[in-house]
Image (tube, coloured by chain):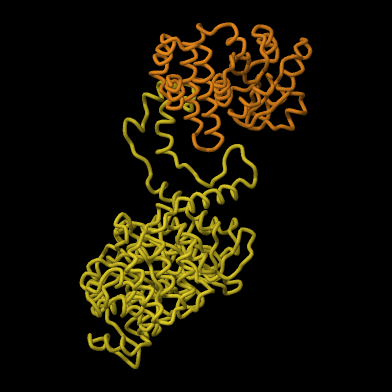
Amino acid sequence: MAINDVYRAVLDFEEDSIAALIEKELAEGVEPGQLLQEGLIAAMDAVGKAFSEGEIFVPEMLMAAQTMKLGLDVLNPRLGDKDAQSRGVIVIGTVKGDLHDIGKNLVGMMLEGGGFEVHDLGIDVSPEAFVEGVKKYQPVILGLSALLTTTMPVMEETVKALKAAGLEQVKIMIGGAPVTRDFAEKIGADGFSADAPAAVELARSLSR
Amino acid sequence: MLNAKENGKLEQLHKASMEILGKSGIKFLLPRAVEILKSNGIRIESDVAYLTEEQLLYWVRKAPSEFKLYAENSEYDIVIGGDNVEPAPTFGAYQIIDYAGNARPALMEDFINFVKLYEANPTFKVNGGCCVQPSDVPAEHGIMLMYYAAYTHSNKCLITNSGSAEDLSPLFEMAKAAYGDDMEKWAAYPRITTIVNANSPLQFDPRMLETLITFCQAGQPINVDSGAMAGSSGPVTYAGNIALANAEVLAGIALTQMIRPGTPVMYGSTASGIDMKNAAVAIGAPGAAICFKYATLLAKYYNLPCRGGGALSDAKKPDLQAGFESMMIYKTCADNKMNFIIHAAGVLDGFASASYEKLIMDFEIIDFVNRVNREFEISDKTLALDVIEEVGHGGNYLANRHTPKHGRSEQFIAKLSVRGNAAPDQLEKNIQKRMAQLYAAYQKSVRDEAVLEKMRGIMLANGVAEGHIARINSL
């Protein structure tokens, strides 16, 4: 099956050939939505599973996600409204005072790999800037990242700022090395994830 | 490389050992051994041999500086000597201790399980011996049954038990069933090895001397070993303990060369110390590490291959103590190029016990140490200057292609160590998972049925119960 080539290309990190492979499939009349679901997203699901089982490692998962992203760039303009809408929008960022972004970027790439449309507000993002971002992109989920115990309180400030702005409908997921499930509950976040593949699962359940 | 201080120390230790050999002498508690020494011009008084430095070095220099040991599968043939370091199974533990610290007698099933785990670990090219001492077979048949169990379950180089001439006779008959009667060929392609321990201080007992003579006559390598314990069977001071052990080992090696010049032999050491508080043996102590280090230095000083060490511990269960002691002793030995490391995995409780979980932990220790000692390569690819430029300030290397490309080969991929997001019991889970993987990877050797039939015949003729043989075949 030709879609299988796209699926394999993601698993084999074929960054250089994924775009051409997708063009070829599209030219042969394969539906863009089918290439997305059965090729790219299915491959990233397999990657997430292999990671959870310890078979592949973080840098390899990232390579797969990058490959997926390159494929997605080709596919995006061809996706119909239905396919585009089915991909939930997520806004992410590292909270104010914190310049760490490796984990946040990893989660962002995996979320894209999981089929979400991700808008990354970057690092050192103030609660006000998060509010602005949510208003602008209208996400289903907002993801907050912090690596420092000293910046974790800013997560709580951000949750409060969203409520104050009347944006309670946005689900909030948080993560980062010192962040715990208990902390998430305490500050009124909707979910916590300990690693990137679990963040994809969490985002799926929150966006349902 | 030796530093000047160590060089000076080795001279001092050598001179002291020569003085011990000349003044106190070594007692050989077997008339046949005494005869051999006497016929080679060694001064004997009663059963004590007094070797001069000249005599000793004349014989010791006949021993090869390295030799090859041959496995059933030639992929596992090993060179013992030089800078080569080969881990080998533990030896002689009579109990199994579980993860919680409960002890029970070791069984033949444990012996075979250990053989399977060593066999499935590609880091090991040596198997068998007395990796645990099975309590469910008669002691007098243990030598034959353990060899049969190892031969039927391993393709690697095999250690055997030591024993009296009478004990060893059926063992050698069994080995001849596998490798033929041509003793010249045997000597040219050594197949089995064992341990000959001095009975410190300053003596060799009859059983060990019979092992020494039997193996040397067959051209099979042995390691002549001293287990002098500083404070009980040797002086409490390391200089004295090491000089004593050195004298014992060299005297034994001289005898091997009188029996068959050129016979491969290892300079062995299990010299250690005792715990001053309770006089218990202390094999996981810094003192043991010092003794092993000097065993390697002295062996290399005499241009001999060396055996010693292990992932040794006195811990009563596979716990924190087991971890830190084992790593210290194994790494000291590997860093100093101990050529043949019996007890490389599984032992604790001062040699008395073995543990499945510790066996798996020690496998990881060995792989850690091997990785450290392999260091790193410098090339354009590994310096990665283009990648450093590409990632730039404040970027990250996780998402750069260079990382997955070299990650698995450059970074050590731990099988046990717990990092990142994990539950507190993850280490135990990792140990069990690794053990299950090794059992699953284990493949039983395919053996010539005619050879096995001969071996079984020899065992039956020597009084071994059929049930014990059948049990081994079923495992």
Q: Position of residue B290 (x, y in %)?
A: 44, 63
Q: Quadrant of residue B210?
A: bottom left
Q: Residue at x 22, y 85 (%)?
A: B40
Q: Nearer the viewer, residue B268 or B95?
A: B95
Chain letter matching colour yellow: B
> Of residues B206 and B110, which is closer to you in this image?
B110
Residue B137 screen position, x and y as percent: 50, 75
Q: Is residue B21 left or right of residue A58?
A: left
- In this rendering, the answer to whether B184 lies above or below B442 is below
Q: Is residue B102 left or right of residue B147?
A: right
Residue under the point 28% across and 89% down: B35
List x then y, in percent, for residue B124.
40, 56
Colour-to-chain, orange: A
Rendered view: B137 above or below B360: below
Corner quadrant of residue B16: bottom left
Name the image quarter holding residue B115.
bottom left
Answer whether residue B13 is visible to the viewer in this image.
Answer: no
